[in-house]
Amino acid sequence: MVASKQKFYIFILISCLVGYIWLLFSFYHTNKSHNDFEVCLIKHVTNIPCPSCGSTRSVLSIFQGRVLEAFFINPIGLILALTIVITPVWAIVDLFIKAESLFLFYKKAEVFFRRKSVAIPAVILILSNWIWNIYKEI
Amino acid sequence: MEAQKVDMFIMTNAKFFESHHIGIIRDKLIAMDESRWIFVSTIQFVDPTTSIIVSILAGSFGIDRFIIGDTGLGIAKLLTCGGIGIWTIIDWFLIMGATREKNMEKLQRVLY
């Protein structure tokens, strides 16, 4: 899917755009009706929250300046907020100066996360976040 | 390499590749040196059927992407709740093709 550079940049830009549209949609939706609009398949099927449930709320509270609250909703929101702010800018700059630094960074990050010394702690972190999510009944 | 050996390889491994790849694979294998046969015959390919089952059961966690070796996309899928649920559903249809493409990449690394 991301074998070629061009496809990678298109994919990054489209997914960031979808992310912003989703954020806007859920921002206005929660303001109007106070009902949570959930798309998580795991939560709908099993009634148990998934590791990243609540990250939309978390990102929204970061953008409203409540970082600590965001951390307590779901720490993954912090990573996502950083990604959604940085990557589109990086991708567009790359496209303008005809560089490929984001693509190279992605490739390097992939190799980095495949290392056992990184992958195992990451899995443990995600699992503990999941347990915390279930405990919080997010 | 012998055509018989190559055809045997194609017959047993055809399900791992896209149909339009098969012709190229056959030509490349026939042109390949006999000494590299051991590398080609020992590559571990991912079965597209396995990946579709994993995609249906654990697609929201991005496990299907991790299995075929797309670690970056797997992490993205895991952290975004399966791409707000939409990507999970799209991947039910894309993952078999993506698996075959990845298998082709694996083979290409040995062939070239």
Image: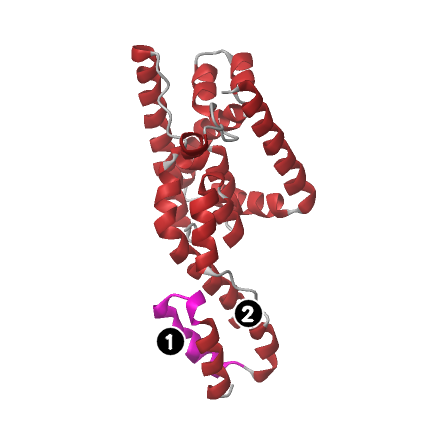
Say if the magenta span includes residue B16.
Answer: yes
Q: Which residues are magenta?
A: B14-32
Question: Residue B23, labelled with which disc?
Answer: 1
Secondary structure of the residue carrying tag 2 is: helix
Please name whichever residue, B75 or B96, is drawn nearer the observer in this view of the structure: B96
Q: How many marks can you see?
A: 2
Residue A100 in view (yes/no): no
Q: Residue furthest front?
A: A46
Residue B56 vs A126, above or below: the answer is below
Q: What residue lies at 65% left-to-right and 47% top-to-bottom?
A: A115
**Crowding at label 2, few (<14), some or many (≥20) Cα neighbours within 10 Å?**
few
Vertical placement of B3 versus A47: above or below?
below
Q: Amino acid at mark 2?
A: Val
Mark 1 crowdedness (10 Å alpha carbons): few <14, some 14-19, many ≥20: few
Residue B64 image point, x, y percent: 48, 48
Quickly name the residue at label 2.
B110
Residue B35 in the image: x percent, y percent?
Answer: 61, 81
- Mark nearest the camera among 2 and 1 is 1
